[in-house]
Image (cartoon, helix red, strand yellow):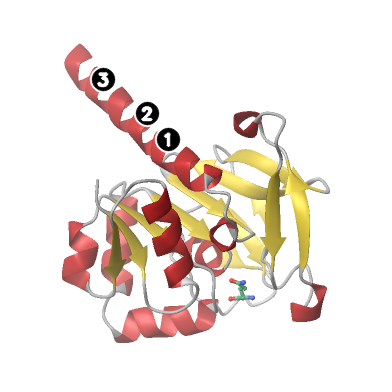
Amino acid sequence: MRIGVLGIQGDIQEHLRAINKIGHEPVWVKDVPTLESVDALAMPGGESTTMTKLLKRFGIWDTLRERIVDGLPVFATCAGMILLSEGVENYPAQDTLRVLDVTIERNGYGRQANSFEADLYMNYLGDVPFRAIFIRAPKIYSVGEGVEVLANYNGVPVLVRHKSIMAASFHPELTSDFRLHMYFIEAIARLNEEARTEKQDV
Ligand code: GLN
């Protein structure tokens, strides 16, 4: 499986490293042909307005949206999640891809100085929590029907999934705990398997 990392701005290297560590060959995606060639995509944290501007300038924005709508599996973290969202409550003019039915409050946990770490629990992780790093993190404001909440922090969703899209308010790529990247890959494999079985049933 070719797993791309949207490599325009942000913590690209960290996602490349995480994908490599879990045994896949990461692909740095910075143009349309490379985007067309990948089977899944990580969208890093960084600065959502800068990323959006550059993705449009490089002509990648529309293809990115089309590929995700067509089912390209995506794991987006922090600014990446803002890009996927339906919209930004506190910056209503900000353009987003509108492929994941959540709305966002940008910097909803405070400024850089309010960065923090927290232990998150989810079934998949068993008893060992995930140490999540929040940096000027987007706060999920609303979650649409059909979007599964995989983890909460103080009662607020911080990790969500809808079909083959997974998004986190925090930065799993900045740790050495790659379980969420693995979860993503396993989720894709499960969906592919289901699709294959459905085809056979027809
Ligand atoms: N605050 C950034 C934004 O709004 C996201 C921060 C991050 O990705 N660490 O784009």
In the displayed structure, 37 sits above or below 28; it is above
* Number of the label disc, if any, that sits on residue 201: none
Tell me: 127 left or right of 40: right
Quarter of the rendered image showing ligand 1: bottom right
For the point 52% across and 82% down, the residue is: 49
Q: How far apart are marks 1 and 2 (CA)?
A: 5 Å
Q: Name the residue under label 1.
A: 187
Q: Is residue 23 left or right of residue 148?
A: left
Q: How many marks?
A: 3
Asked if the residues shown at circle 1 and circle 2 are in contact, with their CB atoms under 8 angstroms apart, the answer is: yes
Q: Is mark 3 on a helix, strand or loop?
A: helix
Q: Which of marks 3 and 1 is in front?
A: 1
Q: Tag 1: residue type?
A: Ala
Circle 2/circle 3 CB separation < 8 Å: no
* Dot 2: element: helix
Q: Name the residue located 21 percent from the left edge and 71 percent from the top edge.
A: 32
Query: Which quarter of the picture shows residue 135?
Result: bottom right
- Circle 3 is placed at which residue position? 198
Q: For residue 36, which quarter of the picture?
A: bottom left
Label 3: few (<14), some (14–19) or many (≥20) C-alpha neighbours in 10 Å: few
Residue in front for this viewpoint, 198 or 134: 134
Q: Where is residue 34 in the image (x, y as percent from the top left)?
A: 20, 66
**Quarter containing the N terminus:** top left
Residue under circle 2?
190
- Going from N to C along the chain, the mark reached first, 2 or 3, is 2
